[in-house]
Image (cartoon, coloured by chain):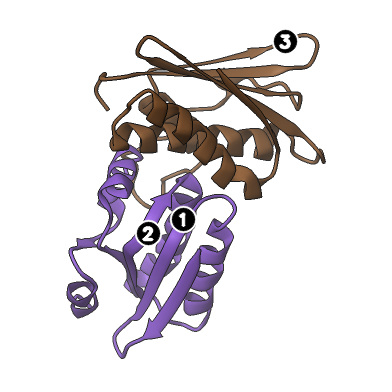
Chain colours: A brown, B purple
């Protein structure tokens, strides 16, 4: 298992993508799968920075990557605002230009790119996002 | 990320080199707004050197496409979209919002 802590800042997205990309490469995911995993991690981190830590300085994101059998599990921990995923409507990806909304797109992509995505908000103030991708499953 | 622009008679060519994410998307927005603020609404976005794009990039493109297509005055078209970026655009339902060309010359010729 690899663990790293990043300052919650967009400038660290490169490093975050590299970090999860390393773990994905180690497990032997395809280039397409690695890109998907990096994109999902980027979208997740962006949401944490934009929403969990909105107006909060010096937030951090702890990321654990663990590999078991054919599965990569990425866990991201933050102690910003609690988040209720059910409060984010799914974007309408068929709406025409004027109707199209961007909100919710990050989460939508995460759910499409990864096999499992789930959130927990602990009473002590930690938010925990878990994303799992299995090797060889479609996409 | 580096962005270069070139003005043609019929349109503006924007070439993006590198990665577009929440950190760099503002540069893309600034570039596109610079063009539309000048009253130019026909834009080719050449993605041949684009390595990666997240929804922050999609957001920038959507915003500018709305401005360009208003009153039918123009549009943003995409050229040389890399496979990985194309897949993500498809996932997000964005491919139908932008015309797509295999190379920049063809795209510029569209205008």
Residue A98: horizontal and vertical position, in percent?
A: 41, 52
Foreground mark, 1 or 3, reads: 1
Left or right side of B39 for B45: left
Left or right side of A108 for A120: right
Residue A122: horizontal and vertical position, in percent?
A: 72, 10
Q: Do marks 3 and 2 share a subunit? A: no
Answer yes or no: is residue A98 visible: no
Residue B70: horizontal and vertical position, in percent?
A: 40, 67
Give the camera-side residue of B90 and A59.
A59
Q: Secondary structure at mark 2?
A: strand
Residue A100: horizontal and vertical position, in percent?
A: 41, 45
Q: Residues within 10 Å of mark 3 (few under 14, many from 20)?
A: few
Q: Residue at x 37, y 34 (%)?
A: A34
Q: Chain of mark 2?
A: B
Q: Quadrant of residue B7?
A: bottom left
From what the image shows, is residue B56 above or below residue B47?
Answer: above
CB within 8 Å, label 2 to label 1: yes
Left or right side of A72 for A128: right
Q: Residue at x 75, y 26 (%)?
A: A81
Q: Which residue is mark 3?
A: A122
Q: Secondary structure at mark 3?
A: loop
Q: Which residue is mark 1?
A: B19
CB within 8 Å, label 1 to label 3: no
Q: What whole-number distance in Å separates the C-alpha atoms at marks 1 and 3? A: 34 Å
Q: Chain of mark 3?
A: A
Q: Residues within 10 Å of mark 2 (few under 14, many from 20)?
A: some
Mark 2 and mark 1 lie on one chain; the one further toward the N terminus is 1
Q: Which residue is mark 2?
A: B50
Q: Residue at x 72, y 21 (%)?
A: A82
Q: Residue at x 29, y 65 (%)?
A: B77
Answer yes or no: is residue B62 visible: yes
């Amino acid at each position: 298992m690899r663990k790293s802590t990043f300052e919650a800042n967009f400038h660290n997205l490169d490093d975050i993508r590299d970090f999860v990309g390393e773990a994905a490469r180690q497990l032997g995911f395809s280039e397409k799968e690695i890109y998907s995993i990096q994109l999902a991690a980027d979208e997740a981190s962006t949401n944490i920075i934009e929403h969990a830590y909105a107006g909060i300085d010096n937030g951090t994101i702890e990321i654990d990557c663990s590999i078991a059998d054919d599965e990569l599990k990425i866990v991201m921990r933050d102690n910003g605002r609690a988040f209720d995923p059910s409060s984010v409507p799914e974007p309408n990806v068929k709406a025409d230009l004027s109707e199209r909304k961007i909100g919710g797109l990050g989460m939508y992509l995460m759910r499409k790119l990864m096999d499992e995505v789930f959130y927990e908000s602990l009473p002590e103030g930690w938010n925990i996002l878990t994303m799992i991708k299995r090797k060889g499953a479609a996409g | 990320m580096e962005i270069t622009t070139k003005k043609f008679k019929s349109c503006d060519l924007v070439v993006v080199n590198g990665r577009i994410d929440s950190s760099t998307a503002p540069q893309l927005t600034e570039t596109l707004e610079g063009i539309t603020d000048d009253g130019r609404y026909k834009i080719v976005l050449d993605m041949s050197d684009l390595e990666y794009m997240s929804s922050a990039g999609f957001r920038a493109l959507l915003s500018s496409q709305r401005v360009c297509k208003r009153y039918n005055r123009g549009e943003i078209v995409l050229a040389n979209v890399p496979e990985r970026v194309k897949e993500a655009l498809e996932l997000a339902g964005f491919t139908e919002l932008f015309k797509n060309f295999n190379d920049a010359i063809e795209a510029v010729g569209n205008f």
